[in-house]
Image (tube, rainbow, N blue to C red):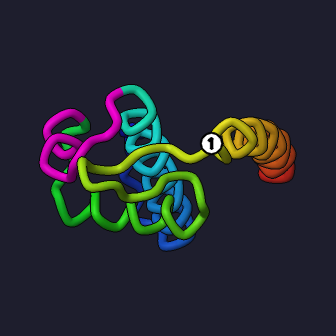
Amino acid sequence: MVEKIKSGNHITNVAEKEVDLLSRHIDVLKTVKEHGPIGIIRLSQITGQPQHMIRYSLRTLEKGGIIKPSSQGAVITDNVHETLGTLESTLDEIITTMDELKKKLK
């Protein structure tokens, strides 16, 4: 989980929540990739996230075609490697954008 900075500012709180959500989705995906097929209870135990949050992440990842349900639990799809590559390049772009935003604050 991403370490939170308590600022009380609405703009930063929204950004922190979105980063936390992305971090959770990545943790769930990584766990499904490493331990799949895997169910909600086991995912919750491994990630330390509540089951309702795991369900939400699983739904999101399934809608994206990255995982799919099976009779034994969630499993990755053939799209996972392409998605991880895209995610990595997107995160690089976000880092660049964040650096530019930091410069604007100075």
Q: Main secondary structure of the magenta part?
A: helix
Question: Image point 68% across, 36% down: which residue?
Answer: 81
Q: Is residue 100 magenta?
A: no
The residue at the point 85 percent across, 52 percent down is 104
Give the residues in magenta.
35-46
The residue lying toward the viewer, choosing from 23 and 9, is: 23
Vertical placement of residue 40 versus 89, above or below: below
Q: Is residue 42 magenta?
A: yes
The relative height of residue 15 versus residue 82 in the rendered view (above or below) is: below
Residue extending furthest front?
71
Place residue 7 in its image quadrant.
bottom left
**Most foreground residue, 57 or 90:** 57
Q: Position of residue 92 (x, y in %)?
A: 79, 36
Q: Residue furthest top?
A: 34
Residue 30 in picture, x, y percent from top left: 45, 34
When the figure is inspected, residue 29 is found, relative to residue 10, above or below; the finding is above
Q: Residue at x 40, y 26 (%)?
A: 34
How many numbered dots are placed on residues in this image? 1
Q: Residues within 10 Å of mark 1 (few under 14, many from 20)?
A: some
Question: Where, by quadrant of the figure, is residue 42 drawn?
Answer: top left
Residue 9 appears in view = yes
Horizontal side of 73 relative to 44 (left or right) equals right
Above or below residue 26? Residue 20 is below
For disc 1, the marked residue is: 80
Task: Name the residue nearer the viewer: 44 or 79.
Answer: 79
In the rendered view of the protein, which quadrant contains the N terminus?
top left
Q: Position of residue 27 (x, y in %)?
A: 41, 39
Query: Is 92 on the left-hand or right-hand side of 12?
Result: right
Residue at the image position 41 percent from the left and 45 percent from the top: 75
Residue 44 location (% of width, % of height):
18, 46
Secondary structure beneath disc 1? helix
> Of the residues shown, which amino acid type is indicated by label 1?
Val
